[in-house]
Image: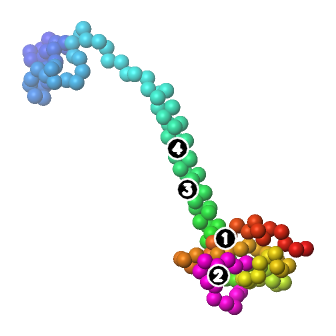
Amino acid sequence: MSQGKKPDQVVFNEDTQRYDASLKPYATNVGAPAIKVTDNSTWKNRNIQKANKQIKAKYLELKAAYDKMMEELEYNNLVYNARYNFEPIVGESYHLYRDKKEQPFLSIIAPSDCSFDFIGSFKLNSEFVWKKVNNDDHALRPS
């Protein structure tokens, strides 16, 4: 052994030139229990699956909201691009039809009162956005 070299079981820090066994976050003597790394792969896998399920659920919620918004945008564009010769009133329902040239037109006439090619019923909201109205009451049209 060369001069200044300490035996392996003695914890001497060469940089600070001090004995620092008491400062270590782990046991340093030969009789100390062995440090064992716990197997946490089961915990990781279980929580990865939980996290992935949560992220997928959130993604599906966002996708459904996006799809609904895109559908509303399409309906809004369809109604605004339709032909009509009146100024729609906010809060009133109107009915969208196709003419013989397949061009959309907006009318106050309900589907049950006419035989036009019915597309859907819409209501202009306070933000001037056309919203599709559930038209169960208009489902049966005269033949």
Q: Start and end of the magenta stretch?
A: 83-95
Image location of residue 135, percent across then percent down: 73, 68
- Quadrant of the image for the N terminus? top left
The residue pinned by badge 1 equals: 132
Task: Check disc 3 and give the amino acid type.
Answer: Leu
The residue pinned by badge 2 equals: 80
The residue pinned by badge 3 equals: 62
> Which residue is found at the position 61% from the left and 67% from the top?
70
Task: Check disc 2 and give the amino acid type.
Answer: Tyr
Q: Nearer the viewer, residue 72 or 5?
A: 72
Image location of residue 21, percent across then percent down: 16, 19
> Which residue is found at the position 64% from the left and 67% from the top?
71
Alpha-carbon span between mark 4 and mark 1: 31 Å
Q: Is 55 left or right of 22, judged from the image as shown?
A: right
Q: Is 16 left or right of 52, judged from the image as shown?
A: left
Few, some or many residues within 10 Å of mark 1 (<14, 14–19, 20+): some
In this view, the mark in front (2 or 1):
1
Magenta region includes residue 114: no
In this view, the mark in front (4 or 2):
2
Few, some or many residues within 10 Å of mark 2 (<14, 14–19, 20+): some
Image location of residue 98, percent across then percent down: 79, 80
> Which residue is found at the position 67% from the left and 90% from the top?
86
Secondary structure of the residue carrying tag 4 is helix
Specify the quadrant of the image occupied by residue 141. Answer: bottom right
Q: Is the magenta stretch mostly helix, strand or loop?
A: loop
Residue 54 badge: 4
Q: Which of marks 4 and 1 is nearer the N terminus?
A: 4
Image location of residue 61, percent across then percent down: 57, 53
